Amino acid sequence: MTATEEPPPPGAVPPMPLTLAQLAELAGVSTATVSKVVNGRAEVGSTTRALVERLIEEHGYRRQRRRIKPASIIEVVFHELAGEYPIEIVKGVQRIAWAHQLSVVVSELGNRHTPDLAWMGDLLTRRPAGLITVFSGPTESQSARLAAQEIPLVVVDPAGNPGPGVPSVAATNWSGGLEATRHLLELGHRRIAMITGPTFALSSRARLDGYRAALDAAGVPVEPELIRQGAFQIEDGVTHTHQLMRSSRPPSAIFAANDGQAIGVYHAAHELGLRIPEDLSVIGFDDMPVWRWAQPPLTTIHQPLRDMGATAADMLISLAKGEPLQHRRVELATELVIRQSTAPFRP
């Protein structure tokens, strides 16, 4: 409001949202152009798109046509479909979806963590009952477009800040990192290395913070050379274990930020002629079913991936029904699972 504008009188009714035609008139473009912006189509110039989106944000958008009934599906999108991580989450989503006579559709973003315009346009055309994104998420403007189309969104294991008001489900990653490191400390280990996940991931940073907190509480200095940057890949475990164990003061234990990295540690230990856990204790994070059969069975932090998927589906269905959520940010507890890959420190 400028200095010359009069404030609205008390009890004034706010202006009604504008139609496509009214938005087009304000923007000086065709109704078809505004429709393309609203529906996430790619063939609109960036300047025009920004203008239309600003007008929608300022004035709102009112549909004139009859509301389209959403498809009876929940769409789950991953940055990448690889390993057991997505399978566990989808199983949790399916459990809830099927109980509500909904189907589940799975897609991926080609290792991107933000949908592109083409993918977003296809989603708006499909018009699912709701969208669950995993380790990825739409931009604020994309979230606003989903809201305009009345497509609810829930983010699972958000890589970054999911955005204002966007519901999310995660695990207690900090506590998991703390518990994993504390377990190794209680076994007498003091030179404990950690192979982290990517720096952009909230879960990775939280697990690293938990590791540091456990060392600090035990009075053990955090040694930067024992912290190795990874990307949640098996190759991280192989590469960093070779480097760590060939140093002048190798660690006696390694905490890997996920189970895949831990299996990479196993591979490297075998190549170096080291025995697990006699020569090197190893602990992972996730508790993927397949790694329970590693030799020796892997000690790890259980992350309740199926429950995370089920919780997200429950939240999504509540939002689709117009019901308020009790909590918009949910964290489910992790748990230490002790198997045979960790043992007391041997001087």
Image (cartoon, rainbow, N blue to C red):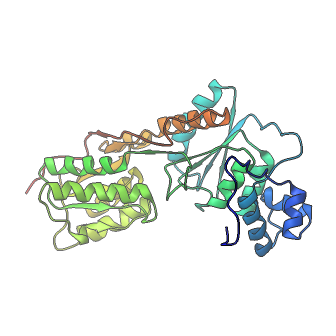
Q: Quadrant of the N terminus?
A: bottom right
In the foreground, 142 or 112: 142
On the image, the x and y values in percent for residue 279 come to 18, 55
Residue 189 image position (x, y, % from top left) = 14, 55
Q: Which residue is at a point 88% across and 59% down the rendered structure image?
A: 22
In the image, 217 versus 37, the foreground residue is 37
Taking the view exactly as shown, the residue that stands out farthest to the left is: 347
Q: Is residue 146 above or below residue 205?
A: above
User: Relative to 178, is 329 on the left or the right?
Assistant: right
| Residue 34 found in image quarter | bottom right
Q: Is residue 280 something one can see in this rendering?
A: no
Q: Residue at x 36, y 49 (%)?
A: 173
Does residue 278 appear in the picture of this structure?
yes
Q: Is residue 68 left or right of residue 270?
A: right
Residue 221: percent from the left, percent from the top?
A: 15, 65
Q: Is residue 218 above or below residue 72?
A: below
The quadrant holding residue 248 is: bottom left
Toward the viewer: 200 or 276? 200
Residue 202 rendering spot, x and y as whole percentages: 43, 57
- Which residue is drawn at the image coordinates 80% and 61% (left, top)? 37
- Quadrant of the frame with the C terminus: bottom left
49, 247: nearer the viewer: 49
Q: Residue at x 39, y 52 (%)?
A: 258
**Left or right of 274 in this view: 68:** right
- Count numbered badges in the picture: 0
